[in-house]
Image (spheres, grey):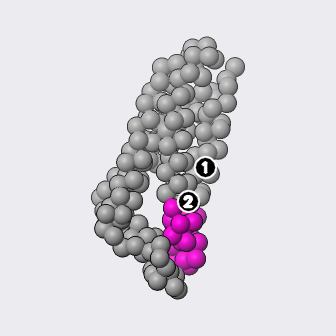
């Protein structure tokens, strides 16, 4: 039963990643707008005057592509990992453990994208922690997603009997 739960959890990470990437592409203006709000530092007093602030379209597009590409990668790795886990669900513990590698890579890519993109770049470099407008909407969501995926990865990665 635990193996099935682990497979379902990996599939939920894949669903989150694919749905998120799809939403980011379908609402490209919203995606680039969120990146622009972070990079321009215009959502808090004095931010837009900072030497770090930028409205460079190349930087904004790079940030948006970073989000979409890494969400897609997380989704692909997680989905392929789930397929391998399904195939190995009745095998011995070592075989099932080995089948988890792509699933855990998917979780890792998702956590990397969320932590690096929103916490390191947006919050730390572009000081988004100062923004009452964006803090709850973007940073708290990124932290929540990263934390939940991280906890699921720990559970998935545990050895089975």
Work out whether 78 lies above or below 86: below
- The dominant secondary structure in magenta is helix
Q: Would you say residue 11 is visible in this rendering?
A: no
> Relative to 62, is 93 on the left or the right?
right
Between disc 1 and disc 2, the foreground one is 2
Q: Which residue is mark 1?
A: 148
Residue drawn at the location 53% of the way across and 54% of the way down: 116
Name the one closer to the observer, 13 or 53. Answer: 53
Q: Position of residue 42 (x, y in %)?
A: 45, 80
Q: Would you say residue 151 is visible in this rendering?
A: yes
Residue drawn at the location 51% of the way across and 70% of the way down: 126
Work out whether 90 lies above or below 51: above
Residue drawn at the location 59% of the way across and 58% of the way down: 143
**How would you rate the neighbour count of disc 1 (Cα within 10 Å): few for under 14, some for 14-19, many for 20 or more?**
some
The span picked out in magenta is 119-140
Residue drawn at the location 69% of the way across and 19% of the way down: 161
Q: Position of residue 118 (x, y in %)?
A: 52, 60
Name the one closer to the observer, 152 or 123. Answer: 123
**How would you rate the neighbour count of disc 2 (Cα within 10 Å): few for under 14, some for 14-19, many for 20 or more?**
some
Q: Secondary structure at mark 1?
A: helix
Ranked by sequence position, the earlier of labels 1 and 2 is 2
Q: Which residue is mark 2?
A: 120
């Amino acid at each position: 039963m635990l193996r099935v739960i682990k497979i379902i959890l990996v599939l939920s990470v894949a669903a989150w990643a694919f749905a998120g990437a799809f939403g980011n592409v379908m609402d490209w203006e919203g995606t680039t707008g969120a990146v622009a709000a972070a990079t321009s530092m215009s959502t808090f007093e004095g931010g837009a005057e900072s030497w770090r602030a930028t409205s460079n379209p190349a930087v904004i597009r790079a940030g948006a592509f970073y989000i979409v590409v890494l969400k897609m990668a997380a989704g692909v790795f997680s989905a392929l990992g789930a397929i391998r886990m399904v195939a190995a669900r009745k095998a011995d513990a070592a075989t099932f453990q080995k089948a988890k590698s792509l699933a855990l890579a998917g979780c890792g890519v998702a956590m990397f994208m969320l932590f690096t993109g929103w916490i390191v770049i947006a919050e730390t470099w572009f000081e988004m922690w100062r923004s009452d407008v964006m803090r709850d909407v973007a940073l708290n969501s990124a932290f929540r997603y990263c934390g939940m995926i991280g906890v699921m990865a720990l559970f998935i990665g545990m050895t089975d009997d």
